Image: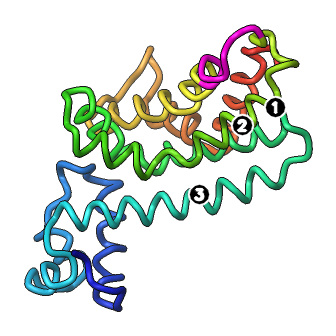
Amino acid sequence: MARPPSEIGMKLRRAGRRLLQEKGLTGLSVRETCREAGVNTGMFHYYFGSREEFLRDVLKDIYAEFMENFKAGVSAGGTPRERLKNALIEVGRFARVMRGAAPVLFADMAYGNREAFGFLSSNFTEHMSQVADLARQCRQASALRSRSVPFLVASLIPVMVFPVLIGGVMERNGVENVMEMPLKSLGDEIFSDEGIAERAEIALRGVGL
């Protein structure tokens, strides 16, 4: 079990976050985390016990920060549509942060890893209930008003998430060009705040909002 926060623990968490985004879940090692943080491995195990416990703590930190941004973004909107658009933008930004780790998490779930599924379903779902509530408020004005709220959400979220995750997978695999366009240029477009906001608008218009 992880011990209460300390300066050493915070150094390890910060190092873990940086490496998680660069290496993904499978590439993040205890030794490299300790080297990045300037902490010996004995202190790592003293504070976190295991690599798995450490990863859970780091992912919880990342999600908690996302939820702060998510709630602030949603509350900045006026109409339900504006709040829903802001929610989608924050989801897209979160996907950008998680693009190194998320493909591995999804792969683990796809192959029946119950621990990965349990962690995500227990810790990464609060925002989905809020997106669903906003979609419910907007549904009557949508072209998909005859469809269920889960159907509406499933029509919106992939537009925000999958382009970022696929871009991250291509980055990690050294892809240089996509459709004769340099991946770096495409990535700048896909991962930018402007690109994320434009996709949120496209997603909403796609369901008639």
Label total for image? 3
| Amino acid found under the numbered disc labelled 3 | Met
Residue 21 position by quadrant: bottom left
Split into 4 quadrants, where in the image is the C terminus? top right
Above or below for 184 versus 66: above
User: Circle 1 sits in a helix, a strand or a loop, which is it?
Assistant: helix
CA–CA distance in space, label 3 to label 1: 20 Å
Decide if residue 35 is on the left or right side of residue 23. Answer: left
Which tag is nearer the camera, tag 3 or tag 1?
1
Q: Which residue is mark 1?
A: 137
Residue 28 position by quadrant: bottom left
The segment highlighted magenta reads: 146-153
Q: Nearer the viewer, residue 48 or 29?
A: 48
The label number, if any, that marks residue 180 in the structure image: none
Q: Is residue 150 magenta?
A: yes
* Label pair 1/2, CB-CB below 8 angstroms: yes
Q: Position of residue 89 (x, y in %)?
A: 67, 42
Q: Which residue is mark 2?
A: 133
Residue at (25%, 52%) from the top-left corner? 23
| Amino acid found under the numbered disc labelled 1 | Gln
Most frequent secondary structure within the magenta stretch? helix
CA–CA distance in space, label 1 to label 2: 6 Å
Residue at (33%, 74%) from the top-left corner? 13
User: Circle 2 sits in a helix, a strand or a loop, which is it?
Assistant: helix
Q: Residue furthest right?
A: 78
Q: Which residue is mark 3?
A: 67
Q: Position of residue 49 (x, y in %)?
A: 14, 74
